[in-house]
Amino acid sequence: MEILRFDRSNNKYINEAAQLLAESFPQAYWDSADEEMQQILEDGKLAFMATENESLIGFAGAMPQYGTTGWELHPLVVRADHFRLGVGTRLVLALEEAAVDKGCITMYLGTDDEFGKTSLSDTDLFEDTFMKIESIRNLQGHPFTFYQKLGYKIVGVIPDANGIGKPDIFMAKRIGQRGNSHR
């Protein structure tokens, strides 16, 4: 497996990434994956790809927010047959390193719970919000625990972001130092 900056000139990889995005998140990208890929690969953003035997097995992107001190990790996609093989971890670490070089202090992300995979789903998060976040449980393989293993912390939620009882879970990690562009 190789982790490389995403080759913006390689249409084969761009098409494979769009297909992977649509397959992985059909509820969001079944009809817009090509357009989303163009946005992910815009100048000023970061994108890395994982390849194996000249095939794309995953990719990740990040975009600057709050000037350059806060970057949003979006998206992280790994082919299902490569889950739990370190692909996602290596992609996130490559993004973090490159973002720090661009002045990033905090990397953050939103990880939706649209399908009842955490204890935060199907509950009123406008009541006892922080208690519910503190006692979150992973019910069905939600990716928030993957990000926790990489050092990300839940910093908030948007209740009902994807419909009643379907929150977006916000996570963040300090990856850079104030006044220092390296770890």
Image (cartoon, rainbow, N blue to C red):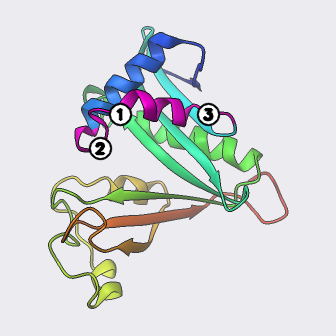
Amino acid carrying mark 1 in the image: Ser
Q: Is residue 42 magenta?
A: yes
Residue at 35% across, 33% down = 32
Q: Is residue 155 magenta?
A: no
Could you say which quadrant of the image residue 24 lies in? top left
Q: State how far apart marks 3 and 1 are (Cα).
A: 16 Å
Residue at 55% across, 53% down = 72
Contact between labelled residues 1 and 2, with CB atoms less than 8 Å apart: yes
Residue at 55% across, 31% down = 48
In the rendered view, does 183 fall on the left or right side of 153? right
Q: Mark 3: few, some, or many residues within 10 Å (few <14, many ≥20)?
A: few
Amino acid carrying mark 2 in the image: Ala
Rendered position, 5 above or below 66? above
Q: State how far apart marks 2 and 3 are (Cα).
A: 20 Å
Q: Position of residue 61 (x, y in %)?
A: 53, 39
Name the residue carrying label 3.
42
Q: Position of residue 141 (x, y in %)?
A: 21, 52
Rendered position, 178 above or below 89? below
Q: Counting residues from the N terminus, which is met first, the one under dot 2 or under dot 3?
A: 2
Image: magenta residue range: 25-43
Numbered label attached to residue 51: none
Residue, far bottom: 128
Q: Quadrant of the C terminus?
A: bottom right
Circle count: 3
Name the residue carrying label 2.
28
Amino acid carrying mark 3 in the image: Glu
Numbered label attached to residue 32: 1
Contact between labelled residues 3 and 2, with CB atoms less than 8 Å apart: no
Q: Position of residue 20 (x, y in %)?
A: 33, 27
